[in-house]
């Protein structure tokens, strides 16, 4: 498999490969210090820009093969627009757009110099590199015939920046975040015959290489603990259920700060159980563990960049299958909390998994907050489409911080309501609650269900059904799985919960 290698160096014209330049709407070539652009190249650029009607609009590209006056094999010129466009440009998205325009080749030099207002700081350079890494991702490990048009061998990209040493330092952290996103994407893209609960747990345990403590609870341990809501979901499968607990201890010794906690729904395949789903599109239910994948990717990111925080990641791993032992509509189960749940629909299973894992995390680790992620409801896609994840929270400060992190990373969240009227919709005649509240407000009543298992701990629930899988292609993702949430939560931790 071809690898992408990224390095940083002082700006210089390459002797071979692809050269990437940035220009504004005035089409002025960027300054090269004391050096000047060859007159032949300037003339060729102007002629090509006129012929292709290239105006330097943001992320538009113009390609010159065998450019006159330069040693490079080809030049890709990327527009940055007007001054006001440059001020609001996202370097991550710009990096993704550049990667998408590179095409074939084994070497590329990106001169991160440009017109007035163009962000060329070390942070921006590292974020351009992050965007390139994310755009370069492909999941083709099960294809026996590879893409003949794809570049052969490793691709080395050199970013020409004013302060290479500073950019490398920032990239050392951002590359760990990129690895976390890619890990999450890989997990979601895997087929369900490969990634079942025990195998998912094994892959989570690989984080021990980064210094993460990992504990795997099997079915017998879960039964002894009392996670009967979670076990009820998996009882129709031949695959044993699991809970994986990941602990990153990055805070200073003696720190009195409570850990932060992230919980993920990991339904490795969801048939709907006895309340079986329609056949059309059921293959996508291999991605019903995207919340758990995000938590594993996040824990990787925090450990890889040596985040100065104590963080807990807990994921519930099950398969929801129909057989003679499967859970039935009408069953009543007793959750770890002692609260009883009437099963109305076995396809409303993710909240049962999360109920036990939330309660367990709250009781055992006593965190300063809990955030859960889950591909929980189709209803959230009806409400928000695929542009925003649904955010539900019992804490305004935590919610506002998540919204801000979403704006900064492009992983947007939209806060949805909670309230007593919605909570009444999940009251049961036969148990403490039922696992669905009816057709209307489906994502809200699912969140109200979870809220009954967090008590007074600051909590946020992210319904990522629309953003984590099958999401629209973007500058930084051409894959079915987006790895959504890793960058969002890493930014949340980085901005508010790490020790100085």
Image (tube, grey):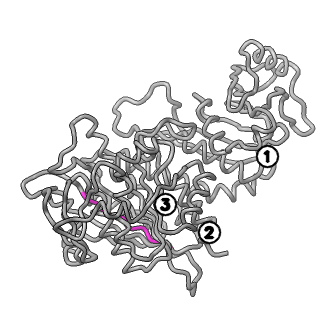
In 3D space, how far apart are the residues under numbered discs 1 and 2 (Cα atoms)? Answer: 34 Å
With 3 as the anchor, is 246 left or right in this view?
Answer: left
Residue 447 screen position, x and y as percent? 38, 60
Which label was assigned to residue 496? 2
Q: Residue at the location (59% across, 81% down)?
A: 252
Task: Check disc 1 and report its element: helix, strand or loop.
Answer: loop
* Front residue of 159 and 182: 182
Q: Is residue 480 above or below residue 61?
A: below
Main SS class of the magenta portion in the image: strand
Q: State the residue in front, 486 or 429.
A: 429
Does the segment drawn in magenta span residue 5? no
Q: Judge whether 486 appears above or below 144 on screen.
A: below
Q: Residue at x 77, y 43 (%)?
A: 87
Q: Residue at x 51, y 80 (%)?
A: 258
Residue numbers of the magenta segment:
311-318
Residue wearing tag 1: 10
Does the magenta-highlighted stretch encompass residue 313? yes
Q: Are marks 1 and 2 in contact (CB under 8 Å)?
A: no
For the residue pair 489 and 457, the one nearer the viewer reads as 457
Circle 3/circle 2 CB separation < 8 Å: no
């Amino acid at each position: 498999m071809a690898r992408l290698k990224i390095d940083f160096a002082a700006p210089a014209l390459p002797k071979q490969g692809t050269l990437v330049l940035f220009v504004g709407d005035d089409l002025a070539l960027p300054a090269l210090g004391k050096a000047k652009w060859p007159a032949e190249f300037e003339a060729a650029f102007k002629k090509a820009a006129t012929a292709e009607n290239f105006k330097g609009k943001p992320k538009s590209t113009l390609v010159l093969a065998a450019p006159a006056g330069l040693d490079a094999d080809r030049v890709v010129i990327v527009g940055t627009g007007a001054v006001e466009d440059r001020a609001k440009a996202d370097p991550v998205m710009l990096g993704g757009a550049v990667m998408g325009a590179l095409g074939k080749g084994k070497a590329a030099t990106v001169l991160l110099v440009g017109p007035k207002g163009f962000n060329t700081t070390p942070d921006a350079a590292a974020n351009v590199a992050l965007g390139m890494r994310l755009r370069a991702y492909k999941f083709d490990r099960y294809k026996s015939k590879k893409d003949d048009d794809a570049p052969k061998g490793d691709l080395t990209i050199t970013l020409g920046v004013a302060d290479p040493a500073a950019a490398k330092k920032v990239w050392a952290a951002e590359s760990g975040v990129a690895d976390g996103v890619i890990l999450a994407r890989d997990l979601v893209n895997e087929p369900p015959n490969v990634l079942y609960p025990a195998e998912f747990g094994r892959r989570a345990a690989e984080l021990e290489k980064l210094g993460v403590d990992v504990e795997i609870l099997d079915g017998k341990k879960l039964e002894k603990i009392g996670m009967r809501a979670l076990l009820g979901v998996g009882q129709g499968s031949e695959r044993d259920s699991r809970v994986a607990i990941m602990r990153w201890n990055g805070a200073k010794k003696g720190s009195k700060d409570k850990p932060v906690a992230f919980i993920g729904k990991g339904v490795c395949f969801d048939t709907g159980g006895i309340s079986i789903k329609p056949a059309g599109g059921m293959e996508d239910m291999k991605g019903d563990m995207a919340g758990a994948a995000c938590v594993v990717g996040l824990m990787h990111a925090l450990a890889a960049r040596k985040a100065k925080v104590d963080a807990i990641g807990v994921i519930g791993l099950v398969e929801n299958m129909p057989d003679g032992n499967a859970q039935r509509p009408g069953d009543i189960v007793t959750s770890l909390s002692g609260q009883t749940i009437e099963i109305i629909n076995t396809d409303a299973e993710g909240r049962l998994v999360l109920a036990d894992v939330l309660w367990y995390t709250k009781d055992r680790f006593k965190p300063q907050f809990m955030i859960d992620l889950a591909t929980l409801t189709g209803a959230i896609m009806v409400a928000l489409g695929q542009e925003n994840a649904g955010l539900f929270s019992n804490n305004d400060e935590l919610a506002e911080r998540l919204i801000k992190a979403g704006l900064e990373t492009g992983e947007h969240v939209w806060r949805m309501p909670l309230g007593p009227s919605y909570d009444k919709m999940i009251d049961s005649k036969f148990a403490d609650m039922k696992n669905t509240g009816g057709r209307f407000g489906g994502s809200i009543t699912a969140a109200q269900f979870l809220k009954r298992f967090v008590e007074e701990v600051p909590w946020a629930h992210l319904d990522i059904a629309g953003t984590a899988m099958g999401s629209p292609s973007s500058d930084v993702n051409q894959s079915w799985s987006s790895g959504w949430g890793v960058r969002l939560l890493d930014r949340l931790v980085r901005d508010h919960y790490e020790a100085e």
